[in-house]
Image (cartoon, grey):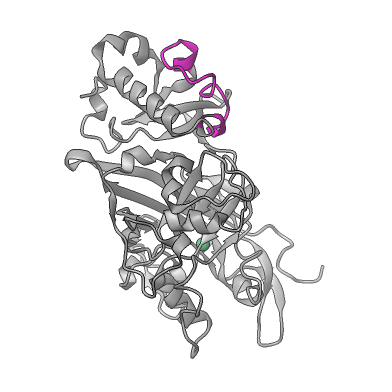
């Protein structure tokens, strides 16, 4: 039992302990760990000799710590639990706790490479029907390999960062036109943060997932459907998704999700050997999507067709090296029913079936000023719940002068 009274019974108790980077009063970024509604300053804890991590906790991002590897991750986690549960440490540790309300949360990692998969069968099927009506929704390769693309790591932003509506080319009856996107959307996803790099030319087998992956974040892969629909064939997403990708401020370590592994959906046809993960497990993360405060969807991550271990194995099977700080996201998480989809493209069926929010307004895609917040929880040890923080963002209008009109 922790001596941090407010954290008792919290989904951010000592069973969770997600890592982040924060600052106070515009000061220097500092690594911290969340306990209840407080943040423990790990930089100060290492300064004081309370934790030994070779200086990795005194850096402005988590990357140095991520590079240390699982034995060190586990040792530091066990030490933090000890500091927060043993009353003898309370006099030294209590002054290092700050209310979350008094800090600013920053991007916790320097994102190295960013990859986005497409691993929900329901999402792929829905998008296929909407984008390519009359054709097979699931393409022939989909059940043989985790489809993905390399995204733009430099535009990954931390939760809370406003997102400016992108402008670009879209199709019209009179040919392509330029202007602010009229079909701006979300994609509710789960991201995996790589800690330990791999050598060029050396694929990472499925069994090595936990040796390389440190933890989990929530991701919103903002998508301009009109730009995407015009540009995506034949090479895939480009400007329709590269303008911004939001991630949660807290990285939940894999240890906190030890009780959340569940059998993943059976794969038929069977996969090639390098993709065979035994046991074949996914994570029972329950996502929720709030649009201007209204709960519009609860996507279930446990139903994803491809597992995070298979995604990692596929991402490296050609010999591409992992770097510390790599982020790979699952793809939109959509379940079988309309109230379980992870995008508004699916929720409103391509914009044909608007939703009415509680303020009486009708929506198909995002309006300027809209806010979307994605949260998630998972089963923890002994009947507890692990919360995965949130990823939120508000839409700002496109800058003046991007309406395509001649000036
Ligand atoms: Ca995506």
The answer to whether residue 331 of the structure is visible from this angle is no
Q: Is residue 276 magenta?
A: no
Q: In the rendered view of the protein, which quadrant contains the C terminus? A: bottom right
Query: In the image, is 393 to the left or to the right of 176?
Result: left
Q: Main secondary structure of the magenta part?
A: loop
Q: Say if 67 sits above or below 126 in the image.
A: above
Q: Which residue is farthest left?
A: 383
Q: Which residue is farthest right?
A: 407
Q: Position of residue 363 (x, y in %)?
A: 44, 70
Q: Which residue is farthest front?
A: 273
The residue shown at (44%, 58%) is: 310
Q: Say if 356 sits above or below 151 in the image.
A: below
Q: Is residue 55 magenta?
A: yes
Front residue of this view, candidates 323 and 253 = 323
The residue shown at (46%, 10%) is: 48
The residue shown at (39%, 40%) is: 252
Q: Position of residue 219 (x, y in %)?
A: 47, 52
Q: How many marks?
A: 0
Q: In the rendered view of the protein, which quadrant contains the N terminus? A: top left
Q: Position of residue 135 (x, y in %)?
A: 50, 88
Query: In the image, is 318 to the left or to the right of 194?
Result: right
Q: Which residues are magenta?
A: 44-65
Q: Position of residue 17 (x, y in %)?
A: 35, 32
The residue shown at (41%, 67%) is: 120
The answer to whether residue 173 of the structure is visible from this angle is yes
């Amino acid at each position: 039992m922790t001596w941090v009274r407010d954290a008792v019974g919290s989904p951010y108790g000592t069973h969770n302990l997600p890592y982040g980077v924060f600052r106070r009063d515009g000061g220097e970024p500092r690594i911290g760990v969340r306990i209840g509604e407080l943040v423990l300053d790990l930089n100060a804890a290492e300064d004081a000799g309370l934790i030994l991590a070779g200086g990795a906790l005194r850096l402005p991002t988590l990357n140095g710590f991520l590079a240390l590897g699982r034995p060190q991750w586990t040792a530091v986690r066990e030490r933090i639990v000890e500091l927060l549960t043993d009353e003898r440490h309370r006099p030294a540790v209590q002054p290092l706790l700050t209310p979350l309300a008094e800090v600013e949360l920053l991007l916790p990692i320097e994102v190295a490479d960013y990859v986005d998969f497409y691993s929900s069968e329901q999402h792929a099927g829905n998008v296929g029907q909407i984008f390519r009506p009359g054709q097979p929704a699931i393409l022939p390769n989909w059940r043989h390999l985790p489809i993905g693309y390399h995204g733009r790591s430099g535009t990954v932003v931390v939760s809370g960062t406003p997102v400016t509506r992108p402008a670009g080319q879209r199709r019209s009856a009179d040919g392509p036109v330029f202007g602010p996107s009229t079909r701006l959307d979300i994609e509710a996803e789960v991201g995996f943060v790589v800690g330990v790099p791999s050598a060029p030319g050396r694929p990472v087998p499925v069994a090595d997932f936990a040796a390389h992956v440190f933890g989990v974040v929530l991701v919103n892969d903002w998508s301009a459907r009109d730009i995407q629909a015009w540009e995506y064939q034949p090479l895939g997403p480009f400007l329709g998704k590269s303008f911004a990708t939001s991630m949660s401020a807290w990285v939940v370590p894999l240890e906190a999700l030890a009780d959340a592994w569940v059998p993943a959906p059976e794969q038929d046809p069977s996969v090639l050997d390098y993709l065979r993960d035994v046991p074949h497990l996914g994570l029972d993360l329950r996502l929720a999507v709030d649009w201007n405060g209204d709960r519009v969807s609860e996507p279930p991550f446990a139903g994803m067709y491809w597992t995070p271990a298979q995604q990692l194995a596929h991402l490296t099977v050609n010999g591409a090296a992992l770097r510390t700080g790599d982020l790979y996201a699952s793809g939109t998480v959509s379940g079988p029913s309309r109230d379980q989809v992870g995008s508004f493209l699916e929720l409103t069926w391509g914009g044909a079936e608007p939703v009415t929010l509680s303020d009486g307004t009708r929506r198909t895609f995002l309006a300027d000023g809209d806010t979307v917040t994605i949260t998630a929880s998972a089963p923890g040890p002994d009947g507890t719940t692990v919360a995965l923080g949130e990823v939120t963002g508000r839409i700002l209008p496109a800058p003046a002068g991007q309406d395509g009109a001649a000036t």
